[in-house]
Image (spheres, rainbow, N blue to C red):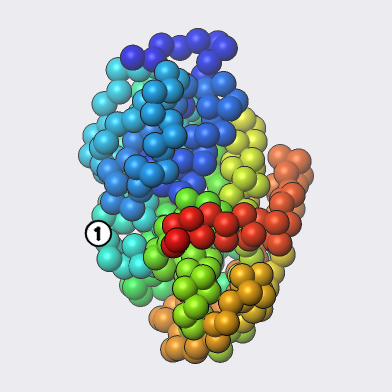
Amino acid sequence: MFTRSASQPISVVTGGAGFLGSHLTDRLLKEGHRVIAIDNFITGSTANIEHLAGNENYRFIKHDVSNYIFLPDDVDYIFHFASPASPIDYLEHPIPTLKVGSLGTHNALGLAKAKGAGFLLASTSECYGDPLVHPQREDYWGNVNPIGPRGVYDEAKRFAEAITMAYYRYHHVNTHIVRIFNTYGPRMRLRDGRVVPAFIGQALSAEPLTIFGDGSQTRSFCYCSDLIDGIFKLSQSDFHEPVNIGNPREMTIKQFAEEIIRITEASSEIEYRPLPVDDPKVRQPDITRARTVLGWEPRVDFDQGIRQTIDYFRTRIA
């Protein structure tokens, strides 16, 4: 059992075996925290945390946080990252996605209240839906279809934000909300349906790169270490309203596909397929708030980050 120490804060990371949860765990350990990671492996992987085996400052608990969370330990911070996060995952697991966004967030907030801990919610740019405002600022309420196929994720996160603010206002829990924009890097699952691993995997396998729609829709890609840096800074701040963390460098999906082909030197061609329902046409964060409040902005340029990500996927495909 971990007990409170001024020199070693204790952090709980739900979704700790996931892509971002595992990177966050590494950052917290580097900052001197002891970490209790919780995951039910619905989309997480032991491969993401195997390097932490034997670390005396790390403990892993297999558990679904949609059920009550019991921890005898002292806790200083809770980072709620548990949730399917790619379209393939939340379309395959719609009910667990809704449950972890609602019940799971409620349970994690309840734990924060009971332990007197700070709380950070990993929310998403999907709260903006298919936005009518560009770029997206935190004061934009979004354009979301609550009953569409993507609604299970969008509305779960919007509810999670609402209950987080309620716990801040009513129970005075020290809460923070990060709205995460498209993020990439090592430990992404090769076939999770998101555009970065999809294109890289197709290029490295000499398959056609699949673009849905005409490729004119835009995305903004942030390298994982930049994102985690912003999240850590937010957790240490006294700011409580949502903060966009992402890279405002915007490109079309077609441009992104062409970049992947160029960097991998693949012989792949581009193949076009129908656009999925409610797929957002644009996605670009306004990071004025992050710059002003946190002194944060992304530092890893696209070419550097994408090459590191490609190198990671080469080891997974070989």
Which residue corresponds to the image point at 60% horizontal and 36% vertical from the top-left? 232
Viewer-nearest residue: 123 or 270: 270
Viewer-nearest residue: 139 or 186: 186
Local secondary structure at mark 1: helix
Examine the rendered structure and indicate whether residue 69 appears above or below residue 34: below
Image position of 209 (left or right of 300): left
Residue 297 coordinates in the image, percent (x, y): 73, 48
Residue 161 coordinates in the image, percent (x, y): 46, 49
Which residue corresponds to the image point at 34% horizontal and 42% vertical from the top-left? 46
Viewer-nearest residue: 178 or 247: 247
Task: Name the quadrant of the C terminus.
Answer: bottom left
Residue 303 shows up from this direction = yes
Q: Residues within 10 Å of mark 1 (few under 14, many from 20)?
A: few
| Residue farthest along the front direction in this orientation | 318
Residue 228 coordinates in the image, percent (x, y): 59, 43
Which residue corresponds to the image point at 34% horizontal and 30% vertical from the top-left? 60
Image position of 294 (left or right of 144): right
Residue 183 shows up from this direction = no
Task: Name the quadrant of the N terminus.
Answer: top left
Viewer-nearest residue: 126 or 90: 90
Image position of 17 (left or right of 99): right
List the residue tagged with mark 1: 95
Image position of 164 (left or right of 237): left
Which residue corresponds to the image point at 29% horizontal and 40% vertical from the top-left? 65
Examine the rendered structure and indicate whether residue 148 appears above or below residue 40: below
Counting labels gives 1
Examine the rendered structure and indicate whether residue 305 appears above or below residue 8: below
Identify which amino acid the numbered label 1 is placed on.
Ile
Residue 154 coordinates in the image, percent (x, y): 42, 62
Which of the 4 quarters of the picture holds residue 230? top right
